[in-house]
Amino acid sequence: MRVLITGATGYVGQSVATALAAEGHHVSALTRDPDSGRARTLAGSGVRLVQGSLTDRAVIAETLTETDAVVHTAYDPADQVGGERALFAALAEADRRPHVVYTSGCSVYGEHAHARLTSATPVDGGSVRAGLEAGLRDTGVPHTVLRPGMVHGGDARSSIVGAWFRDALTTGPVHRGRRDKVWSWIHVDDLARAYAAVLRAPEDHRDRVYLLADSQPASASAVVEAAARAAGSTAPVTLRPIEDENPLYRVFDRDEVVDSSPARAELGWAPRESGVIEALPASFAAWRTVGAPWISSPHAMPSDAAGG
Ligand SMILES: NC(=O)c1ccc[n+]([C@@H]2O[C@H](COP(=O)([O-])OP(=O)(O)OC[C@H]3O[C@@H](n4cnc5c(N)ncnc54)[C@H](OP(=O)(O)O)[C@@H]3O)[C@@H](O)[C@H]2O)c1
């Protein structure tokens, strides 16, 4: 299949590009900067680079004429809504309508008190992410929505785990907000395999929403502590009230436990990688090599969809 990936130079997209290429798909990657190190690495592994932004309608329209599926993982903190709506408009106008696999996240549920999140749990219609999912649905383009839990693993560069590594090496480890909150997690490479699973039989997964996580929810405080130790810090964890924090942290100041059983049953997908705590040492080693600036990056924009 000819697959166009948006965001293939990003944390999630790079793993997805690798997984799809391994399945034999012909992968193209939309990137604003084909000369970046990450873009060149993709090109070196056989991915075709398409220079452009989500808002470059002519580039997208031209590329869609030779595309069977679009995997959307791009995230533009400077203009998340504008970029995605431009992509949706290009998809709606395309003569050949590819199947779209759309990356969403659990911010779609807004503030909630659900013990377990499922695809039937009502979303918060006022959230950025819910609005974008609705915008995609309105195009009528065949699509599948993936809502991952907290993503970890790999070089953790856009994972909250990367922010905790950074804290450990700078201010000392910090836990923000509720101490007892428990989150579902998914390794970035397991997440990537879910996109590949959808594209094995896209029609079977048309208009479906899948939540994706491993079966080992872990408390945020336990992961903060373990991330600090993986980073070599022996300092005690400082507790900070959520009110003083970047809005990004407030989005998930609650339990976020997801039910991924439909994905397992219908996609034939199952996580294979280590759980978040076990993966931390390898992840820290990889994170160090990229020096990922998570919280000082544009992801720190006060969007309820940032990071998921
Ligand atoms: N990271 C997490 O823990 C997590 C958890 C749940 C859900 N998610 C969701 O997963 C998605 C991907 O997140 P990520 O962490 O992989 O993001 P990321 O590492 O920041 O990557 C962002 C990607 O978007 C591309 N991009 C940004 N603006 C663009 C534009 N205007 N036009 C075209 N491409 C553009 C960038 O490509 P170029 O710079 O090469 O153009 C880059 O490849 C996001 O929707 C995020 O909310 C992430």
Image (cartoon, rainbow, N blue to C red):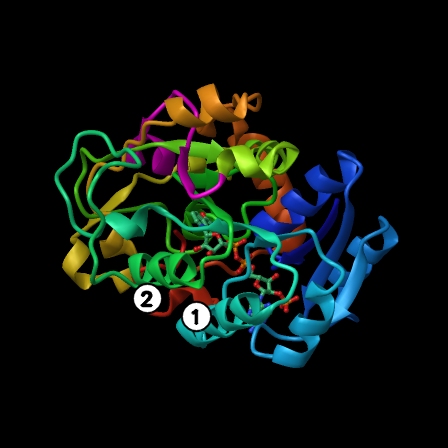
**In this rendering, position of residue 224 left or right of residue 38:** left
Q: Is residue 153 visible?
A: no
Which element type, helix, strand or loop, lies under badge 2? loop
In this image, 251 relative to 153: left or right?
A: left
User: The N terminus lies in which quarter of the figure?
Assistant: top right
Say which residue appears at 60% left-offset and 40% top-offset. 154
Residue occupying image coordinates x 37% and y 70%: 301
The verdict on residue 210 being magenta is yes
- 258, above or below 156, in the image: above
Q: Which residue is mark 2?
A: 303
Q: Please, what is the three-letter code of the amino acid marked with disc 2? A: Ser
Q: Secondary structure at mark 1?
A: helix
| Residue 31, numbered label | none
Picture coordinates of residue 210 (x, y %)?
41, 36
Q: Tell me: residue 170, above or below residue 49.
A: above
Horizontally, is 9 left or right of 102 in the view? right
Which residue type does callout 1 highlight? Gln
Q: Nearer the viewer, residue 92 or 52?
A: 92
Q: Determine whether the beta carbon of the residue marked 1 sits less than 8 angstroms from the nearest atom of ligand 1.
A: yes
Asked if disc 1 and disc 2 are in contact, CB closer than 8 Å, the reply is yes
Disc 1 crowd, CA 10 A, few/some/many (<14, 14-19, 20+): some
Which sits earlier in the primary sequence, circle 1 or circle 2? Answer: 1
x and y, in percent, of residue 228 in the image? 42, 38
Question: At which x and y percent is residue 299?
Answer: 43, 64
Q: Residue at x 49, y 51 (%)?
A: 102
Range of magenta residues:
206-225
